[in-house]
Amino acid sequence: MSEKRGSAVDDMDVGDVFDVVVVGGGIIGLSCAWRLAQRGARVAVVERGEPGCGASGVAAGMLAPVGELTFGEPELLELTLAAARLYPEFVAEVEEASGEATGYEQLGALHVALDRDEAAQLRRVHDLQRSLELEAEWLPPRQCRDLEPGLTPSFHGGVFAAGEAAVDPRALTRALVAAARAEGVEVMTGTEVVEGIFESDRLTGVRTRSGVFHERHRVVPLSGNTGQKNHGIDSSPTADDSVRAETVVLANGAWSSATPWLPEHARPPVRPVKGQVLELRRRDGEPPARHILASERVYLVPRSDGRLIVGATVEEMGYDTTVTAGGVHELLREAYRLLPDVAEMELVDAIAGLRPGTPNNLPLVGPGAIDGLVLATGHFRNGILLAPLAAQSIVDVVEGAVR
């Protein structure tokens, strides 16, 4: 890619010049930037807040393509299984490049049927898993409890997917920032894109406004935090700049369609889907569970430091990120039904984020509707899992465009 730096775009003595500018500093955007830089591209990431301040900072980090299998979505299953196969090597490489842990653990996932209706549905899902030759085993209650002694006393069996894993998205974000910077990526935080730069019909960069921009989504006055929720972006006095590049990668998640700096026909069909998540913690610091646990209405992802991530609601509420009493109540109620020990855990945090949904639940990765634009968005509930695959695909697209 480096041979492109002598192009007409580079000859313009206006602003900073890169091979690729990635708009969005979540796990998808950072993964793309890091992989592109490894291939020799000069890359900038433009993030209006701090890295991971959107969906990446709220996600639980489940890497569970088998347990999350949905009827009628074979293309999505193919993508998630391929991404899961890439993950061990991906996180090992990130950790080596950054010197930071990502919290990756192959925990296995136990999906539990709490009543007869849930058991009937879980049986249907398991039949589909078996028909696809996926690694999943139906277990009676006693064997489920052997795996996870803290389960509720009364339930109707479960499905154990031994190969499922989890990662800490916040830790992964920090590691990706360090790995990307080590490869020469310029990560611009507190920087908002306000305008596209065009030469004829080709997108050749973005104009930015820098200041102190940050997403404020932590709202619940727990652990001494008494601040009020204020959705959106705060800003201090700003300065404008231009960032020119051969390729602009749009990786700003739920805000991908809210991009007035792109022509209307080039804005991808992405909508925000709200999710509320809780963070609990065992007071003795011990892991709260041995495996990822899930019922029909909730999932629990344990961390080795004693935290337990409880998620997540699915709400079509536009760009609202308010944490609601009803959402918190629903998550705690369903978590208690599955793992009664949650009643004694500390409630550390309650947050809400916006997943980037698409009409068919498939991600949008590839060339955009105008020259110079590449999409890496619309990953909905699978952004953390699909990150290594998305990055690989974006490298292929960008390298193909410059050959």
Image (tube, grey):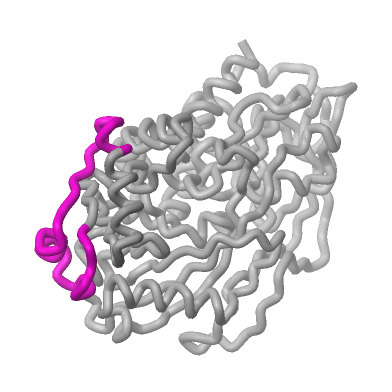
Residue shown at the point (67%, 38%) measured from the top left: 250
The percent coordinates of residue 141 (x first, y second) are: 15, 63
As drawn, the residue found furthest toward the top would be 403
For this view, does 154 lie left or right of residue 171?
A: left
Vertically, is 87 above or below 6?
below
Camera-side residue of 364 and 296 = 296
Residue shown at the point (20%, 63%) measured from the top left: 290
Please count the marks in the image.
0
* Quadrant placement of the N terminus: top right
Task: Give the residues drawn in magenta, as a range.
Answer: 128-157
Whether residue 93 is visible, yes or no, is: no
For this view, does 93 lie left or right of residue 190?
A: left
Camera-side residue of 278 and 332 = 332
Q: Can you tell which quarter of the image residue 131 is in?
A: top left
Q: Can you tell which quarter of the image residue 274 is in?
A: bottom right
- Magenta region includes residue 148: yes
Residue shown at the point (36%, 34%) measured from the top left: 81
As drawn, the residue found furthest toward the right would be 200
Vertically, is 7 above or below 254?
above
Whether residue 145 is visible, yes or no, is: yes
* Quadrant placement of the C terminus: top right
Residue shown at the point (50%, 75%) measured from the top left: 350
